[in-house]
Amino acid sequence: MEPQEQQALLDTLNSERFADTAPATVHATLLDEGQYLGSVRTMYRLLAANGGCRERRNQPTHPAYTKPELLAVAPNQVWSGTSPNSRGRPSGPASTCT
């Protein structure tokens, strides 16, 4: 494709009329009007080469995970049920109650 044709296609894709339109829709609209500037794949290729092919909507981002911190300033303030040294009912075959 000649540089002049590429520029004409980029100008059409970046025009106000087609600014928020997918290349496939632009291609179909131009064909309905009797114009053929290039294939859909060519449109995507030109947009990608010129930084125009990206997600146009703002994507949500998850907040950064912060590990919970257990802080005790006195005895018996922090209790965790997953500690291997925690006191409680023993488990295992010897701990059955009769």
Image: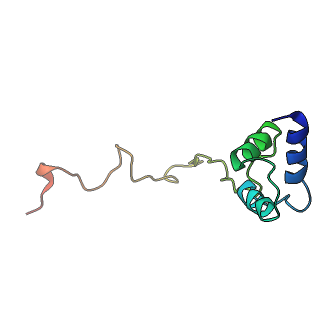
58 and 7: which one is in front?
7
Residue name at image x 87 percent, y 41 percent: 5
- Quadrant where the image shows the N terminus: top right
Residue 60's x, y, as percent? 70, 57
**Res. 33 image quadrant:** bottom right
Residue name at image x 81 percent, y 61 percent: 34
Image height of 67 relative to 60, above or below? above
Image height of 73 relative to 26, above or below? above
Residue 32's x, y, as percent? 77, 65
- The colour scheme is rainbow
65 and 85: which one is in front?
65
Q: How many marks?
A: 0
Horizontal relation, residue 20 to residue 70: left or right: right
Residue name at image x 85 percent, y 34 percent: 2
Residue lying farthest to the top in this orientation: 2
Residue lying farthest to the front in this orientation: 34
Horizontal relation, residue 87 to residue 9: left or right: left
Horizontal relation, residue 3 to residue 46: left or right: right
- Quadrant where the image shows the C terminus: bottom left
64 and 75: which one is in front?
64
Residue name at image x 35 percent, y 48 percent: 86
Residue 93's x, y, as percent? 12, 50
Horizontal relation, residue 96 to residue 29: left or right: left
